[in-house]
Structures are given as C-alpha cells and as structure tokens.
C-alpha cells in the first residue's frame, strides 16, 4: 500500500447539529437552536459537537469583523471626500502669545514630531535668543556624546523587553540558577531597605522579610511574580552601591538583575492582576532611573503601562469598597497608588508632558502616617498625627503637594489664556497644603536646624522646592502677557527664592558639608533650578529689549549673578543628566554675556571645552551693580567676589537673532532629563 493510501484524510468538522445530521436536514447552525429544530419544537435536543461550536463561533466572529472593517472603510471614504484640500485648508487665527503658551512641536531627525509642554524649561528658551543659539550651535543634547556619561554595561543574560519579550524567555529554573549567592542578595536587599528613598515604603518590610526567608528555604515553589520583585529590589540595591560607593562590580550585576526582572515579569504574565507585579515594575523603573540618570521615552511608556495596570487592578478605588481586603493590604495599596501618581506627575513634568492620573475617577484615600510595625497590630490603631515623624511622614506630605502640582501642570497645558478664577483656586490649594505641613517639615534655615538629621533638613528643602516650582509653573504664562503685574511678580519672586535656596543647599552638600550625605537626594533638584533660571533669564531678556512701565518694580537682572554662582555649584556637585548639563551651560553662557566684561570673555573663549573641569571650583566672581533688598544675604556675599577667572562660552551673539527660526529645526529632539535619586 502506498504512502498516499496510508495517509489518513483529515476529519471533517461536523457543523450541523446532531438532530439535523441524523435526519440529513440542512442546518443553519443558529444557537441556541437551529431553524429546523425550532420548526419541529425540539429546541432542547439541538446540540452541536465541541469542534462545531468552536468553528461556528470563529466564523461568526470573522463575519462580524469583516462587517466592522467595511463600516470603517466607508467612514474613512466619507472623511476623505469632505476633508479640506491643500488649497482650501483654513487655519484658525491664534495669537502668538497664546500659541507660544501651549507648548512646542519639534521635528526629530527621523521626521517625527515631539511635543514639549509649556511647563518645561525648554519651552522658555524660545524667548532667549542666546540660549536658543547655544542649543542650535551645540546640537541636541539627546545625541551629545559626553565623556562623563556612564558606559553601557554588557551582560551574559539575554535582554528581554517587558512589552514584547524575546524569542527565548527563561524558565523559573533558569532564573533561580542565575540568581547570585544568598550572601550577595542579602547585601543588595539590605542596601535598598536601609536607604532613605521613599519608594522603598511601597513594600512592607516585615512581610517581605518573612517571604524572603521562606524563599531561601524552598526556592522552587516561589511564584514568578515574587521572584521578579526580589530581583528588581536587588537590582536597585546593586545600582545604589555602584553609584554611591563606586563599586565597579555592581554595575554589571545590576544589569543582569534588571534583565532577570524582565524575564520573570514576562514569565509571570504581568498583564494579569496579581500581587507583586506593580511593586516589581516600580522597582524596575527605579533601577533604570538610577542607572541612566535620565527620564527616557521608554521609561515614560513603561510607567504609563504601570498606571494602566493599576487601574486594571483597582488601585484607583479605595480598598474599603471590599471588606475582604485586609487592613495591611489596604494601606499598602494606598501607598503604591500614591507612589505611582507621584512618579507619573514628576516624570511627565521633567519630559515637558502632562500627567493625567489626577483626571482619573478615583477615590483612593491618601496614605496614612503608619510605621510598618503599626500595620502588624490587630486591630490596626488610628494613624499617627503628621507631627509624629515616621519614615512615611515625608511621603504623605509630598503626595498631597504633588497632586496639586499635577493639577497646576495640567492647567498650564490648556490651549487658552489662563482663567483667573482657576489660577486663584490652584494658588489657594497650594497655600493650603503648605499651611498644613507638620511643624518639623516646615521650611527653616540650616542654621536654625543644625541639630536635626540631614535627611529631615534636606526633606524640608525638597518640599519647599515643589511649592516654589508649582508657583513658577502656575504664573509663568503671565511673564509674556501685558499687565498682570501682581502675577508676574509672584512668578519672579518664586523663581528667585528657588535659586536662593539652591545656593544654600548646594554649599551644604560640598565635601564635609552639613548635608554631604544627602547629595543623591539633592541632585533631584537640578531640573527645578533649570526652570527657575530659564524664567529669570527670559524675564531679564524681555526687560532689556522691551521694558515697560509696569515692569519697573521687578528687576530680574540683579539675580543673574546668583544664577551664575549656582551653575558653578552644580558643576562641583555633579549632574548626572546630560540634558540638564546642556541646559546649565546654556544658562551660564547667557548670564556671562551680561555680567562678565567683554574683554574677559574674549580672553577665555578658547577654554569653552574646559568649562566644567574641576579647576573651576576656586573661580571667583565680582558682580557689578547693586542688590535689591529682597534677595537672600548670600547675594551680598556674591557681590564681593572677583570675576575675570570665569571662563566664557563661544557662540553667536544677540545680533544674530534673525538667523534662528521659531523651532530648533529637524536636528533637535527633546527627550527630557532626570536624576539618579527620586523620592
């Protein structure tokens, strides 16, 4: 018998119902009963084979999709027939100030378009020809090769993308085999839990410790989601050791652990609501932030997925809606939701985008001031008052002011002029949150709090910077609008105060300073300085070119020497973000042209490449002119220093303004920056 004869014919799928097939009737295959069975009053006997049911369902779905495609095609054809042509397109007339206030659309090298919102400092540089010229001359910081940028770490573990995976996803047994020795993991996990970073509080330390011990007793029974949590926590610990203690062995280990995290998350099918997934993704984002020092588009998209998974898991609804959720679990869910919202608002702000988490229909109560030990009590006691300082106190307060900042940023992106009533309401909300600060977190000078812990002192500055930054964003549109003197002064005063505070704070983080141990936390404020400095430079530039009578009482040129000093202090402290370093150089170039004598700039023009070398640490500044009475005492100290040793930027002068177009051009791509420490 030939192979063709031995080969069995494929079995036909029986599509008709059993009664119709037996009676050899034509069946229309309807459910729950076909037409033949309905006609013969035997609906109860009308049954199909399992394969027949699947086939019929698939066929019906295909027909439904075909009809849907036909409807969409018809709809598109209608749109094409009514769409305006190139010759009849009408663009609404929009005032220049209004169009400018709604953000910028920039062309990328690949022909795409990138949006930078009005709350970002890059939207302000359009007002400052010299700063814009520097960016045009130097090229996009997105593609700048910086000698200080950390080298990419290679890994022997296959890379996997959380969203799209890879052709070879490791099994749980493979990941367990790749896990470092327990003594190494112990050190990495302890490093993270001993840090002062607020994100660590989304994990209940006593519960994690119990689960951690159980894991090492029986690793094979661990779930992939908890394994992802473990390696993500370990990767953050390794990255902190690599960046803070300069341990060269920790960089490659952190990269391996990050790649293992992605494999474990994919293996866990992270898109399904389950414990430990959100926590793992947040720690994975944290590890990438510490490593890169920049907020990237990839991280922005990844965090967007986290917020979607949170809504899928119901984190935006308060756990009290389900009495079966334990009090411990309920409080941890509130902490997670607060952390995701705070990250989303801050990350979107640093990219010049708008966060939408505040627009969600949500009723999740804010986190309470509990210690981890409080949550182990049965029953859980009432929350501690905010005047009782706990590891959660700062995060609870920061979450409140962060939500107001999110509303302010959203308001700043609206495509119309500011509504005075809305601005007044947001200002009142901001002031209310500030008035509700507990006594130990209210702003006070370093001299008044020298006995307090460094973390507490730095935390006060962090909250004050958020408040001042929010005021800057809220009122920055009024800088370019005629009139509105009160609002314009509010913006200038907030930006000036932010710069003044940065002088004091950065000086305290110098080697051996009072806050030297808080330097990783302080580095998070570089973008706040960029925003304030850009606003003050823009205002000073506008005053110089078109001074009006109503702008005579808020002279911004007097604060330019202070900005120059802060730029030097940031160079000494170190800036991890390439984008932020690029902005600092542009700011310094602009200020130099106004406070440095022309002969000094000409003499030092050849030192442009050495601008940010350590030899600048001892440079002295002499500032001409007088200081207004409203500035900090540190400005008076700045006036007594000498200026000729400060190096100069090269580049086009203000006379070349007409050479620059409204946009940077196709070579510019705005990517945003971040810091190595988020709280």
Image: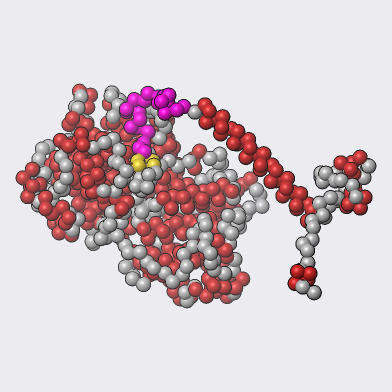
**Image point (49%, 66%), residue name:** 260
User: Would residue 549 appear left or right of 57 to someone viewing this image?
Assistant: left
Provide residue 386's location: percent of width, then percent of height: 45, 48
- The location of residue 310, given as percent across then percent down, is 55, 49
- Asked which quadrant contains residue 73, the reply is top right
**Closest to the observer, 74 or 573:** 74
Say if residue 566 shows up in the picture.
Answer: no
* In front of the other: 24 or 477: 24
The foreground one among 598 and 217 is 598
At 52% from the left edge and 26% from the top edge, which residue is drawn?
82
534 up-or-down from 239: above or below: above
Magenta-colored stretch includes residue 8? no
- Residue 8: x and y in percent read 78, 67
Q: Which residues are magenta?
A: 84-105
Question: Residue placed at 35% from the left, 52% from the top?
Answer: 674
Taking the image as shown, residue 74 lies to the left or right of residue 101, namely right
């Amino acid at each position: 018998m030939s192979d063709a004869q031995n080969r069995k014919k494929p079995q036909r799928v029986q599509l008709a119902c059993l009664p119709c097939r037996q009676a050899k009737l034509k069946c229309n295959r309807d459910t729950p009963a076909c037409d033949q069975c309905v006609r013969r009053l035997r609906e109860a006997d009308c049954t199909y084979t399992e394969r027949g049911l699947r086939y019929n369902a698939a066929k019906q779905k295909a027909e439904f999709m075909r009809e849907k495609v036909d409807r969409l095609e018809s709809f598109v054809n209608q749109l094409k027939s009514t769409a305006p042509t190139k010759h009849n397109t009408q663009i609404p007339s929009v005032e220049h100030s209004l169009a400018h206030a709604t953000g910028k659309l920039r062309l990328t090298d690949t022909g795409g378009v990138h949006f930078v919102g009005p709350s970002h400092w890059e939207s302000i540089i359009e007002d400052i020809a010299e700063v814009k010229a520097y960016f045009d001359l130097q090229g996009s910081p997105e593609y700048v090769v910086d000698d200080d940028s950390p080298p990419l770490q290679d890994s022997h573990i296959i890379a996997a993308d959380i969203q799209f995976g890879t052709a070879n996803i490791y099994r749980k047994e493979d990941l367990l085999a790749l896990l470092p020795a327990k003594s190494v993991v112990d050190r990495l996990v302890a490093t993270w839990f001993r840090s002062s970073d607020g994100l660590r509080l989304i994990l209940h330390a006593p519960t994690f410790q119990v689960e951690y011990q159980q894991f090492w007793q029986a690793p094979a029974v661990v779930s992939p989601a908890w394994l992802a949590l473990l390696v993500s926590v370990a990767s953050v610990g390794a990255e902190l050791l690599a960046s803070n203690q300069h341990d060269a062995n920790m960089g490659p280990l952190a990269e391996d652990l990050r790649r293992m995290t992605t494999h474990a998350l994919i293996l866990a099918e992270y898109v399904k609501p389950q414990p430990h997934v959100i926590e793992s993704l947040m720690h994975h984002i944290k590890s990438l932030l510490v490593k890169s020092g920049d907020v990237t588009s990839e991280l922005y998209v990844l965090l967007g997925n986290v917020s979607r998974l949170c809504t899928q898991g119901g984190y935006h609804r308060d756990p009290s809606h389900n009495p079966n959720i334990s009090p411990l679990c309920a409080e941890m869910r509130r902490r997670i939701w607060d952390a995701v919202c705070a990250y989303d608002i801050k990350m979107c702000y640093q990219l010049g985008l708008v966060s939408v988490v505040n627009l969600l229909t949500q009723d999740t109560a804010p986190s309470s001031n509990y210690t981890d030990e409080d949550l182990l009590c049965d029953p859980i006691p009432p929350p501690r008052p905010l005047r009782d300082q706990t590891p959660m106190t700062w995060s609870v307060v920061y979450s409140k002011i962060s939500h107001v900042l999110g509303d302010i940023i959203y308001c700043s992106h609206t495509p119309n002029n500011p509504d005075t009533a809305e601005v007044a309401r947001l200002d009142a909300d901001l002031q209310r949150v500030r008035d509700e600060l507990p006594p130990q977190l209210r702003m006070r000078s370093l001299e008044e709090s020298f006995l307090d812990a460094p973390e507490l002192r730095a935390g006060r500055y962090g909250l004050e910077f958020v408040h001042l930054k929010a005021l800057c964003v809220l009122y920055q549109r009024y800088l370019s609008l005629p009139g509105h003197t009160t609002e314009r002064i509010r913006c200038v005063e907030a930006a000036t105060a932010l710069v003044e505070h940065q002088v004091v704070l950065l000086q305290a983080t110098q080697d051996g300073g009072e806050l030297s141990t808080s330097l990783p936390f302080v580095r998070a404020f570089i973008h706040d300085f960029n925003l304030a400095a850009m606003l003050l430079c823009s205002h000073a530039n506008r005053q110089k070119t078109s001074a009006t009578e109503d702008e005579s009482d808020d002279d911004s040129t007097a604060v330019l020497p202070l900005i120059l000093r802060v730029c030097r202090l940031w160079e000494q402290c170190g800036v991890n973000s390439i984008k932020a370093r690029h902005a600092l150089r542009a700011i310094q170039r602009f200020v130099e042209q106004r406070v440095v004598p022309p002969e000094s700039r000409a003499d030092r023009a050849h030192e442009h490449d050495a601008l940010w070398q350590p030899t600048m640490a001892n440079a002295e500044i002499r500032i001409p002119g007088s200081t207004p009475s409203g500035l900090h005492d540190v400005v008076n100290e700045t006036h007594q220093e000498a200026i000729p040793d400060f190096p100069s930027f090269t580049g086009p002068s203000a006379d070349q303004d007409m050479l620059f177009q409204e946009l940077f051009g196709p070579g510019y791509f705005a990517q945003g920056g971040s810091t190595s420490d988020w709280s």
